[in-house]
Image (tube, rainbow, N blue to C red):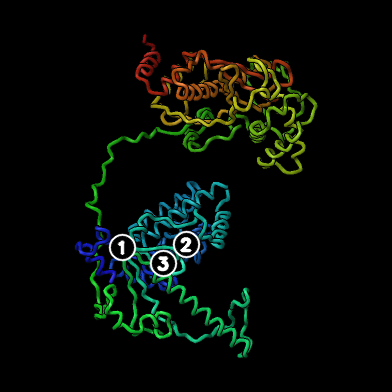
Amino acid sequence: AIHQILLEARAGTALLRGRPVQPGDIAVLVRSHREATLVQRALAAVGIPAVAAGKQSLFATSEARDLRALLLAFLQPADEGRLRTALATVLLGQRASAIASMEREGDLQRGFQAQLLHWRERWQRGGPFAVVADVCAAQGERLLALIDGERRLTNYLQLGELLQEASAQALGMHGLLDWLQGQMANADQDDEQQLLRLESDARRVQIITLHKSKGLEYPLVFLPFVGIDGGAPNTATHCTVHLQGERQLHWKLDRDDAWDAASSQREREQRAEDARLLYVGLTRAEHALWIATGDLAGHAKTRLAPLLGDLQALRAHADVDLDDSTPPGRLPQLLAETEGELPAVRALTRRVPHDWWVYSFTQLAHADAGNSDDIEAAATELPAPAADEPAGAELPLEPALPEAAAEDTAPPDPRFMGSRFGNVLHDALENVDFALWTGWQPQQPAPEGQADVLRRSLHDEGYADEDLDDGVAVLVPLVGHTLTVPLPEGGALCSVPEHERRAEIEFHFAIEPTAVPVLLQLLHDHGISSARRGFGLRRRLEGLMTGKIDLTYVRDGRWYVLDYKSNRLPGYSPDLLEIAMRHSEYDLQALIYTVALHRWLRFRLGAAYDYARDMGGIRYLFCRGLEVAGNGVHVQRFAPELVDALDALFAGGEAAQADMAARARGETA
C-alpha cells in the first residue's frame, strides 16, 4: 500500500494538502524494534527510504560498537583477533573470505596491520575525528549503498566529533577507550548531545513504536501488526504485577495457586496494556489509517478482533475502504528521486597559499633555533602563558651584563623555576582578587582566601600535594610585589578596578603576504630584533598572528599592555632589563601585542581612537625583581610611526609594501 501511494504521488494523483504525498508523511507504528527492522528491510527492498524514528542514544548504536572495535585494534595492532574483529565491522566492511584468507596469505595480513598502524599514527597526530573522517571517505561509496548507509555514515561522523571533544581532556588512547565504553554502558536517550542527527530522516517513512508515538500525530498511519498475537505459551519463571498500588515480583517456584493468580493478573494487565496501545495506534492518524487484519496468527485473541468482527457492516461506511485484493508477489523497485540535475563539480581556480599559517611570538622567536619546521609543528596550538620564558634554571644573558650587578642572590629552589612555574604564576595573577592585596606588605601572608587561589594554581599545573605549601610561600611575595609595585602612570595594579582591566585577552589578526626582508628592515630601523636575520627558512609571512596578552588595563583614559615575567635574572635594574628584553626579543613580543591592541581599539572606537593620545604603552613586570624599589619594571612606548607602519605592512598596503621594499633595496622611496 505504501508503494502504491508513493507511485500515485509521483503521478500526481495522491495529494496531501494540495501537494504530492512524501515518504515523510507516512508513519508505520510497531510494537518492538524487531518489527521495526522487518518493516525497514521490506521497504528498503523496494526502494522506499525509511528510518526507525524515535529517541535513541548515539552510544547505543552498532556504529559505536564498530568504533570501539577499531580503537581496541589500535591499542594492540599485533593482536590478530582484534584486527579481524575490526575488519569485520560494517565500517571497514571486509568480506569474510578476505578475513579467512589472512590465515594463509601473510602479505594480506601485514597489509591490514600496516593500514592499522597508519590510522593509529594519524589518530595520535590529528585526533579521533581525523581517522574517522578518513575511513568514512574511503568507505563512503560502499556505506551509502547500504539500506541505512546515510544513517550509518552520519553516526560514525557524529561519534568522531564526540571522541574528538573528549580527547581534548588529554585522556590518551586508553583513556578514550574507557570514556567510550562508559558512554556506551550509560547511554542516555534523553541526553540531547547523544541523540542521532540526520536532516534527511524527516523525508523518510517514519517507523516508530506505539509507546513512543504517544502524543504525536502523522498524516498517514499504518498498523501492520496489531491484528497478530504471538500466541506463545507462558514459560516465564517470574512476573511482576501491580496490586494495592505497588509492584510485586512473583517467582514460579512451583505451579501453585499463588503463581496461577499472579500469572492471571499479569495476563489481564498485559491485555489492558494491549488495549491502551491499540487506542494509541488508532488515534495517531490525521488523514488516513491502514490496519492489517484477516486470517492472521492469534487474531482472535487480539484487542483488535472485537472491533472488526463484522467486516460487512464496516464496508457500508463511506469512510472505510476494505482492500481484500490479492497482494502482488513482487513489487517493482521505486526509483530514487533526485532534486534536479546534480551540478557539475566545481573546478579549483583560486590558488591556495602554501605559506599561510598561524603564528605566535613564541613560534616566530624559535623559528630558526635549529628546526625550520618549528612554526608548522605548533601552528594550531596557542603557546602556554610562560612558553616564552626559559624552561631551565635561568636565562643566559649577554656577556655585557656585569656580574657585580647581580641582585637576585637567593639560592634557587629548582621546583619553582622555569616555564612550568611561570605558568603557575600567570594563572595565579589571573585569578587572585587584586583589591584584596591593596594593604599587603612584605613578609606578610596572603590576604584571606588568596592562599587557596595560589594553591589551586600549583595543583592545576601538576605540583605534588607535599610541595603546595612551599609553592604558596614562594608565590605570595611574587604576587604581592607584582600587585603593589608603583607603576609609572601612578598607582599599582591592585588599585585598577575590575571593570578597567581584562586578563588573558586572546587575539587573532590577519597578516597579508609580508616579505620577511621588508619586515626585518622595518624592525631594524626602529631598533627591534636587531640581531635577527630571518624567521627560519620562510621568505614571507602570511596567515594569522595569535597570542594572549597577560593584562590589558586603562588608567586615566589611556590603554596599557602588561606582561608578567618569572625569569630569574642576575639583576633587575632598568638598564639590565633593557638587555634582557632585547636578548629574549621581548621587544618584538611587546610590539606584536601593541599592534593587536591598536587594531582592536581602532575597530571598536573608530574615529574616537588616536594612538598618540590613547595608547599608554607597555609594562613588563619581572616579578622576581620587584622587591627592590625602582627595579623589575620595564617601561616602553613604541613610536606611532612604527606601529602604523607595521600595521600597514601586515595589512598588505601597496604603498607600505613598495616603500619598505625600496628601502630594503637601498632606494629612495
Task: Look at mark 3 in the image and give the residue it sits on.
Answer: 208
Q: Secondary structure at mark 2?
A: loop
- Mark closer to the chain start, 3 or 1: 1
Position of 658 with respect to 400 (left or right) is left
Q: Position of residue 160 (x, y in %)?
A: 46, 53
Disc 1/disc 2 C-alpha distance (Å): 21 Å
Give the quadrant of residue 8: bottom left
Q: Residue at x 43, y 69 (%)?
A: 209
Residue 294 versus residue 13 in the image, above or below:
below
- Mark closer to the chain start, 3 or 2: 2
Task: Look at mark 1 in the image and give the residue it sits on.
Answer: 23
Looking at the image, do the residues carrying marks 3 and 2 touch, with CB atoms under 8 Å apart? no
Q: Residues within 10 Å of mark 1 (few under 14, many from 20)?
A: many
- Name of the residue lying farthest toward the bottom: 256
Disc 3/disc 2 C-alpha distance (Å): 11 Å
Amino acid type at mark 1: Pro
Of tags 3 and 2, the one toward the viewer is 3
Q: Residue at x 39, y 63 (%)?
A: 217
Number of numbered callouts drawn:
3
